[in-house]
Amino acid sequence: MTGEVFIDTNLLVYAYDHTAGEKHAKANEILDVLLHTGRGVLSAQVLAEFFRVSTSKLSPPLTKREAYNRVANLIKACKVLDVTSLIVLEAARAAAEYDLAYWDAQIWATAKLNQVPVIFTEDVPAPSIEGIRYVNPFVAEFNVKEWVW
């Protein structure tokens, strides 16, 4: 498959969670491929969530300076999508229509309204919703190279 891939927060967090074992290694492999091919897409929401989680929930947490530097590097390496009023409205519709948690719906709406066809996330609510495909990159049979080349 070719095209952009939306990177969810959990993928970023696992990349810095040294206690996550195989998920840590797999997240780093996936991010390496997505960033080096230019296919990784993030949203402002994901960057904010990553900063919050990485500085408060990791063990040990990143310092705020370390997290700031990671966010700055991600902004340089990825296309970053803004959250707009239309995205908020579409997320609210999806939360109601598909019974999604609001923040998950906002990820979906950002991908949908920016025509990013795939979301890599551990939180898969359905195989696809309105043409946006969800892929759990932490399942054993997943191979990131099959998705980007």
Image (tube, rainbow, N blue to C red):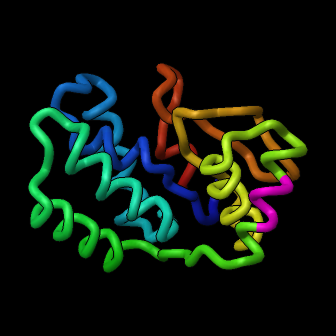
The picture quadrant where one finds residue 24 is: top left
Residue 78, magenta (yes or no): no
Residue 61: where, in percent of width, then height?
Answer: 14, 43
Chief SS of the magenta region: helix
> Vertical placement of 13 versus 5: above or below?
above
Viewer-proximal residue among 70 and 94: 94
> Vertical placement of 85 versus 128: above or below?
below
Residue at the location (19% across, 61% down)? 67
Residue 30: where, in percent of width, then height?
Answer: 39, 46
Region rendered in magenta: 89-93
Residue 14 placement, left or right of 84: left
Residue 99 placement, left or right of 21: right
Residue 34: where, in percent of width, then height?
Answer: 43, 58
- Identify the image quadrant of the C terminus: bottom right
Residue at the location (29% across, 24% down)? 22
Viewer-proximal residue among 101 and 33: 101
Residue at the location (23% across, 23% down)? 21
Residue at the location (20% across, 50% down)? 55
Tally of numbered tags: 0
Residue 66: where, in percent of width, then height?
Answer: 11, 61
The picture quadrant where one finds residue 37 is: bottom left
> Vertical placement of 149 versus 17: above or below?
below
